[in-house]
Amino acid sequence: MEHTMTNTTYEKNTCVHAMVNISTIPLDLILLLYDGAIDYLRKTSLSMSQGNVSQKSHYIARGIAVIEELLASLDLDAGGDSVVHLQEIYLYMLRELTIANAEDDALRVHNVESLLRKLKSAWRQIG
Protein backbone atom coordinates (compact mmCIF):
# COMPACT_ATOMS: atom_id res chain seq x y z
CA MET A 1 0.00 0.00 0.00
CA GLU A 2 2.83 2.38 0.84
CA HIS A 3 4.41 1.72 -2.56
CA THR A 4 1.16 2.74 -4.29
CA MET A 5 0.99 5.99 -2.35
CA THR A 6 4.59 6.82 -3.20
CA ASN A 7 4.00 5.95 -6.84
CA THR A 8 0.89 8.15 -6.93
CA THR A 9 2.84 11.03 -5.40
CA TYR A 10 5.55 10.53 -8.00
CA GLU A 11 2.98 10.56 -10.80
CA LYS A 12 1.38 13.75 -9.46
CA ASN A 13 4.76 15.47 -9.18
CA THR A 14 5.67 14.35 -12.69
CA CYS A 15 2.40 15.80 -13.96
CA VAL A 16 3.13 19.13 -12.26
CA HIS A 17 6.65 19.23 -13.73
CA ALA A 18 5.29 18.45 -17.18
CA MET A 19 2.55 21.06 -17.02
CA VAL A 20 4.63 23.95 -15.79
CA ASN A 21 8.25 24.87 -16.21
CA ILE A 22 9.02 24.26 -12.53
CA SER A 23 12.59 25.47 -12.88
CA THR A 24 11.16 28.91 -13.63
CA ILE A 25 8.02 28.94 -11.48
CA PRO A 26 7.83 26.77 -8.33
CA LEU A 27 4.46 25.38 -7.24
CA ASP A 28 4.28 27.78 -4.28
CA LEU A 29 4.57 30.71 -6.67
CA ILE A 30 1.86 29.27 -8.90
CA LEU A 31 -0.45 29.09 -5.89
CA LEU A 32 0.42 32.71 -5.04
CA LEU A 33 -0.41 33.70 -8.61
CA TYR A 34 -3.79 32.03 -8.24
CA ASP A 35 -4.34 33.88 -4.96
CA GLY A 36 -3.46 37.16 -6.65
CA ALA A 37 -5.76 36.59 -9.60
CA ILE A 38 -8.62 35.57 -7.30
CA ASP A 39 -8.10 38.65 -5.14
CA TYR A 40 -7.98 40.98 -8.15
CA LEU A 41 -11.18 39.51 -9.54
CA ARG A 42 -12.91 39.79 -6.17
CA LYS A 43 -11.91 43.46 -6.11
CA THR A 44 -13.10 43.80 -9.71
CA SER A 45 -16.55 42.53 -8.74
CA LEU A 46 -16.66 44.86 -5.75
CA SER A 47 -15.66 47.82 -7.93
CA MET A 48 -18.38 46.90 -10.43
CA SER A 49 -21.02 46.77 -7.69
CA GLN A 50 -19.89 50.22 -6.52
CA GLY A 51 -19.91 51.63 -10.04
CA ASN A 52 -16.22 52.51 -9.81
CA VAL A 53 -15.11 52.14 -13.43
CA SER A 54 -11.53 53.25 -12.79
CA GLN A 55 -10.91 50.68 -10.07
CA LYS A 56 -12.74 47.99 -12.05
CA SER A 57 -10.46 48.59 -15.02
CA HIS A 58 -7.38 48.56 -12.81
CA TYR A 59 -8.22 45.33 -11.00
CA ILE A 60 -9.45 43.42 -14.03
CA ALA A 61 -6.26 44.38 -15.90
CA ARG A 62 -4.23 43.04 -12.97
CA GLY A 63 -6.24 39.81 -12.94
CA ILE A 64 -5.73 39.40 -16.68
CA ALA A 65 -1.98 39.99 -16.28
CA VAL A 66 -1.74 37.24 -13.67
CA ILE A 67 -3.64 34.78 -15.86
CA GLU A 68 -1.35 35.69 -18.76
CA GLU A 69 1.62 34.86 -16.50
CA LEU A 70 0.07 31.50 -15.65
CA LEU A 71 -0.46 30.88 -19.36
CA ALA A 72 3.15 31.80 -20.14
CA SER A 73 4.40 29.37 -17.48
CA LEU A 74 2.94 26.32 -19.23
CA ASP A 75 5.44 23.93 -20.77
CA LEU A 76 3.58 23.02 -23.95
CA ASP A 77 6.38 20.77 -25.22
CA ALA A 78 6.43 18.47 -22.20
CA GLY A 79 2.88 18.57 -20.89
CA GLY A 80 0.73 16.74 -23.39
CA ASP A 81 -3.06 16.88 -23.29
CA SER A 82 -3.22 18.19 -19.72
CA VAL A 83 -1.25 21.28 -20.64
CA VAL A 84 -3.27 21.88 -23.80
CA HIS A 85 -6.45 21.65 -21.73
CA LEU A 86 -5.10 24.07 -19.12
CA GLN A 87 -4.01 26.43 -21.91
CA GLU A 88 -7.57 26.37 -23.29
CA ILE A 89 -8.96 27.15 -19.84
CA TYR A 90 -6.62 30.13 -19.39
CA LEU A 91 -7.48 31.43 -22.88
CA TYR A 92 -11.18 31.04 -22.08
CA MET A 93 -10.68 33.04 -18.87
CA LEU A 94 -8.91 35.81 -20.76
CA ARG A 95 -11.74 36.01 -23.31
CA GLU A 96 -14.37 36.07 -20.57
CA LEU A 97 -12.59 38.82 -18.64
CA THR A 98 -12.17 40.90 -21.79
CA ILE A 99 -15.91 40.65 -22.45
CA ALA A 100 -16.69 41.27 -18.76
CA ASN A 101 -14.64 44.44 -18.84
CA ALA A 102 -16.26 45.73 -22.03
CA GLU A 103 -19.81 44.85 -20.96
CA ASP A 104 -19.42 45.50 -17.22
CA ASP A 105 -20.52 41.91 -16.59
CA ALA A 106 -19.91 40.88 -12.98
CA LEU A 107 -21.26 37.36 -13.58
CA ARG A 108 -18.46 36.61 -16.05
CA VAL A 109 -15.91 37.87 -13.53
CA HIS A 110 -17.48 35.70 -10.83
CA ASN A 111 -17.41 32.64 -13.09
CA VAL A 112 -13.71 33.10 -13.86
CA GLU A 113 -12.96 33.65 -10.18
CA SER A 114 -14.82 30.43 -9.35
CA LEU A 115 -12.87 28.53 -12.00
CA LEU A 116 -9.59 29.90 -10.62
CA ARG A 117 -10.55 28.70 -7.13
CA LYS A 118 -11.21 25.19 -8.48
CA LEU A 119 -7.91 25.12 -10.36
CA LYS A 120 -6.02 26.38 -7.32
CA SER A 121 -7.55 23.59 -5.25
CA ALA A 122 -6.48 21.04 -7.87
CA TRP A 123 -2.92 22.41 -7.91
CA ARG A 124 -2.80 22.23 -4.11
CA GLN A 125 -3.88 18.57 -4.22
CA ILE A 126 -1.28 17.75 -6.88
CA GLY A 127 1.52 19.40 -4.92
Image (tube, helix red, strand yellow):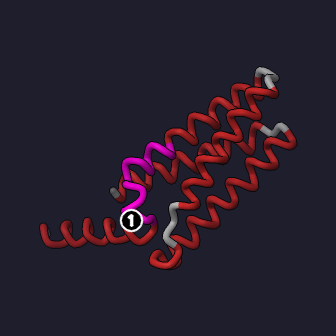
Quick check: 60 left or right of 67?
Answer: right
Q: Which residues are magenta?
A: 20-34
Residue 11 belongs to the span the image colors magenta: no
Dividing the picture into quadrants, the one containing residue 16 is bottom left
Viewer-side residue, 117 vs 84: 84
Q: From what the image shows, is residue 118 above or below residue 51?
A: below
Badge 1, how many Cα within 10 Å: few under 14, some, many 20+?
Answer: many
- Residue drawn at x 82%, y 23% as measured from the top left: 51
Q: Which residue is mark 1?
A: 16
Q: Residue furthest top?
A: 50
Quick one: quadrant of the N terminus? Answer: bottom left
Residue 80: image x %, image y %?
49, 79
- Residue drawn at x 58%, y 70% as measured from the top left: 85
Q: Residue furthest left?
A: 2
Identify the amino acid type marked 1. Val
Residue 72: image x %, image y %?
57, 61
Q: From what the image shows, is residue 17 above or below residue 54?
A: below
Residue 77: image x %, image y %?
50, 78
- Residue drawn at x 33%, y 71% as measured from the top left: 14
Dividing the picture into quadrants, the one containing residue 18 is bottom left
Residue 31 belongs to the span the image colors magenta: yes
Residue 84: image x %, image y %?
57, 73
Dividing the picture into quadrants, the one containing residue 24 is bottom left
Quick check: 124 left or right of 66?
Answer: left
Quick one: quadrant of the C terminus? Answer: bottom left
